[in-house]
Amino acid sequence: MQRLSLYLRRLEHLAQEGVSTVSSRNLAGQLGTTAAQVRRDLAYFGQFGKAGVGYKVEELAAQLRRILGTDRTHNVILVGVGHLGRALLRYKGFRSRGFEFVGAFDIARSKIGKTFGSVTVRNLQEVGRLVKQHDVRLAVIATPAEAAQDVADMLCKVGISGILNFAPTTLIVGDGVTVGPVDLAGALEQLSFQTYHAPMS
Amino acid sequence: MQRLSLYLRRLEHLAQEGVSTVSSRNLAGQLGTTAAQVRRDLAYFGQFGKAGVGYKVEELAAQLRRILGTDRTHNVILVGVGHLGRALLRYKGFRSRGFEFVGAFDIARSKIGKTFGSVTVRNLQEVGRLVKQHDVRLAVIATPAEAAQDVADMLCKVGISGILNFAPTTLIVGDGVTVGPVDLAGALEQLSFQTYHAPMS
DNA sequence: CCCTGTGAACCTGTTCACAGCG
DNA sequence: CGCTGTGAACAGGTTCACAGGG
């Protein structure tokens, strides 16, 4: 469920402010959702709240981390070190959520050997070795559209099981591999669309 | 509908390859969807296909552009010129889809006056004037989480009607303003989650 | 025959409303 | 009382299956 991430994010924020308990209504208000929605989502995975009180912030956060798999670190690699790829390598939001880049790859000679964030760019051919070495399950593709499918095929071959795809193309992969498409231009198009076809309230 | 963007993207690809006609089954195959889904989505907006033949690629693309509002250029501003903001300013995928950055804003003195992509960074206080001047409806927020809500409030005040939010926080805005959340860390969490709770087939 | 557009069945996810616990 | 967890009603979106056109 994609909303669990939002709940966790908000809970961590609340924890940092020293809030120890929160109700579904309260949490929903901060997230622009409804109380029933929050309760239903959480109840699906277990009974975390206390009636009459609400949810213990720290405890619920721990549960959500466990469910999302964020209770431990995940090694991630990135392919395609253009402007976007470099920004992603330096983005601090990943590490604070338990994701660590352990490798970056490109095919351009001029980029190989350079370091961005905390990783050095390697030739794409070395990806198999590094994936085995660090037990990498997740990869980020930030190549041009033309290269993305070939890269995805290679990543599948070396045993990656999840791909976050920033390239503006639809990746076709086999069973057992999940693709998370991130369509930047598409997201703006959605806005443009909703902005014109949604008005009035 | 968020899938229209995908259809359009694929149609433009096909057009470039000189393909003039495509069936729902064919298009679905290239996008990992089903033929019925494609037909239903398209039929919602009108009758674009010819039975026994399929859809004229160029014609359908033009219709989708009209529906999505991509048949003309949209001016966009960006707030928060960090690594991610700079990458977005230089990302070519926006312009090719009809979105043009006409302004970039930050509060850091050190960044103001610098140029990235084709725009020069201005002080955030000038945003109102520039929005009026260029009739800007859409904005991108790429600030740290702490600043994002204040920036959103300011953008609402100057009349922006759509915000693409890359900051890891949920923005609360008034009616008449649409927020498109882009949760980068959340997207990786989804993958992590699905990768563990989905396998077998 | 192949393909679209669409009623109808189906399914998934959301909202409502309330029983029951603290 | 306030708040959770959950059946039950509901809504939205997806899939099926087919009539009809080219």
Image (cartoon, coloured by chain):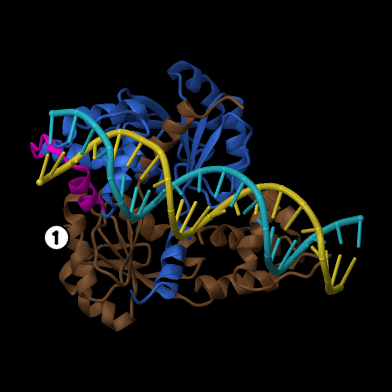
Chain colours: A blue, B brown, C cyan, D yellow
> Which of B196/B131 is in front?
B196
Q: Quadrant of residue C20?
A: top left
Query: What residue does disc 1 label?
Result: B109
> Which of D20/B86 is in front?
D20
Q: Is residue B96 above or below residue B37?
A: below
The residue shown at (24%, 27%) is A62
The residue shown at (46%, 75%) is B73
In the image, residue D10 lies at what x, y percent? 44, 57
Q: Quadrant of residue B115?
A: bottom left
Secondary element at tag 1 = loop
In the image, residue A195 lies at what x, y percent? 39, 71
Label 1 resides on the chain identified as B
In the image, residue A7 lies at what x, y percent? 27, 41
Q: How many other residues sit within 10 Å of disc 1, few (<14), some (14-19) or many (≥20)?
A: few
Instruction: Give the left or right position of residue B160, taking residue A82 as reference.
Output: left
Q: Is residue A24 magenta?
A: yes
- Magenta span covers which residues? A17-31
Question: Can the viewer see residue B92?
Answer: no
> Which of A81/A183 is in front?
A183
Q: Is residue B135 above or below residue A88?
A: below
> Which of A151/D10 is in front?
D10
Amino acid type, label 1: Arg
